[in-house]
Image (cartoon, helix red, strand yellow):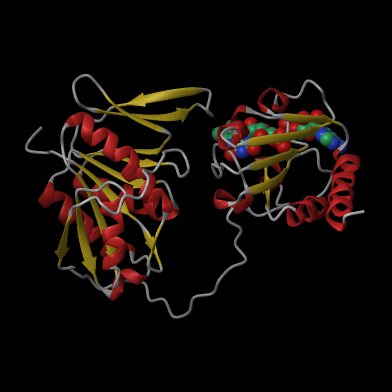
Amino acid sequence: MNGYTGLMVFAEQREGSIHPVSYELLGKGRELADSLGVPLSGVLLGSQIKEEAGELIYYGADKVFWYDHPVFNDFNLLNYKLNLVKLVKEVKPEIFLLGATHWGRSLGSRVAAALGTGLTADCTSLAIDKDGSLVQIRPAFSGNVLAHIKTRTRPQMATVRYKIMQSLRRDVGRKGEIIRKEAELTPSLLTIVHKEKSGEVNVAEADVIVSGGMGLKKAEDFCLLADLAKLLGGVVGSSRPPVDSGWIAREHQVGFSGNTVKPRIYIACGISGSPQHLAGMRESEVIIAINSDPSAPIFRVADYGIVGDLYHVVPKLIDRIKIRRSGS
Ligand SMILES: Cc1cc2nc3c(=O)[nH]c(=O)nc-3n(C[C@H](O)[C@H](O)[C@H](O)COP(=O)(O)OP(=O)(O)OC[C@H]3O[C@@H](n4cnc5c(N)ncnc54)[C@H](O)[C@@H]3O)c2cc1C
């Protein structure tokens, strides 16, 4: 359509490291590009990260458009947007994908608006239709239906959830082209004077998550779950109601309107298993549910279910683990 061809992926980097969602997008992008018979490109904006541009080739890109400027060390939204819009107008990819991270969501909507095209946010699946157009699949109506969305305008843009797509195996034998682009800069309205690391938990990356829901009686009881999580080298997650009640910060929320997680072990304590919660954790490798109600829907997805009061079960689990570790 109007000379648009190829697939482009925005490769997000934080402090010089590529965010893994970018590799996942390249994995899916490779599959889609091959089925369309078109090239797959990545676009990387950063400072002194040419090696990372090469990594995008190893993970499936045919070409990488690489911008090297210190302004891209931080998420300078105006300059990211300016250069992406210019590149998309020049290269004219028929499909442009971004991760549904904070960066991707902020940038995707602005780039789509500037290009006058549509954007489907938070996709969980992508496919190519018989007519060659992109089918963008995402949960709708609180996750009860999967909407299949197509875009009339070009490029077809979508943000895709982290930990949903599979990245390819890194192949250092893959060959591709790295094309250096000159950054165009606009004065930023934002000056970063100081950066402070927050005590931010990264539930999306965690291997073990111990999550609490409204089976907890009060905010302080998350400490019990934190003790178990610490013993297992994991982090604390939450269903949405405790977050809405201000018991725990939003970054801990798992589910449809929170984080999508895929840990090795997910322990759901006092969580009923609503479709909205399951939407964020059902891909976990092993799900352990602790719930006093034997008919709670969480047991339908659980690999191991413990019917019982979490205030009895969790301390017992903690004791057992400690005893095992001490070897007695
Ligand atoms: C648009 C939209 C988006 C949403 N997004 C999300 C989301 O991202 N994540 C999310 O989680 N929810 C989300 N929700 C809310 C969702 O619909 C449910 O309300 C929520 O998941 C229920 O949380 P819960 O399981 O903690 O609470 P409840 O459904 O109240 O379940 C509490 C469970 O605890 C058990 N229990 C009680 N006492 C004990 C005890 N002592 N020991 C053991 N078990 C006990 C009960 O048997 C019950 O099963 C969303 C809703 C909407 C409409």
Residue 245: percent from left, percent from top = 71, 47
Residue 302: percent from left, percent from top = 69, 29
Number of on-image labels: 0
Left or right for 287, reference 305: left
Compared with 159, 151 (above or below) is above
Compared with 38, 169 (above or below) is below
Residue 230: percent from left, percent from top = 74, 57
Compared with 297, 86 (above or below) is below
Residue 221: percent from left, percent from top = 83, 51
Please report the residue visible at 20 percent of the width from the left and 40 percent of the height from the top. 155
Please report the residue visible at 16 percent of the width from the left and 32 percent of the height from the top. 37
Q: Quadrant of residue 6?
A: top left
Left or right for 251, reference 273: left
Image quadrant occupied by the N terminus: top left
Please report the residue visible at 87 percent of the width from the left and 58 percent of the height from the top. 326
Q: Nearer the viewer, residue 229 or 260?
A: 229
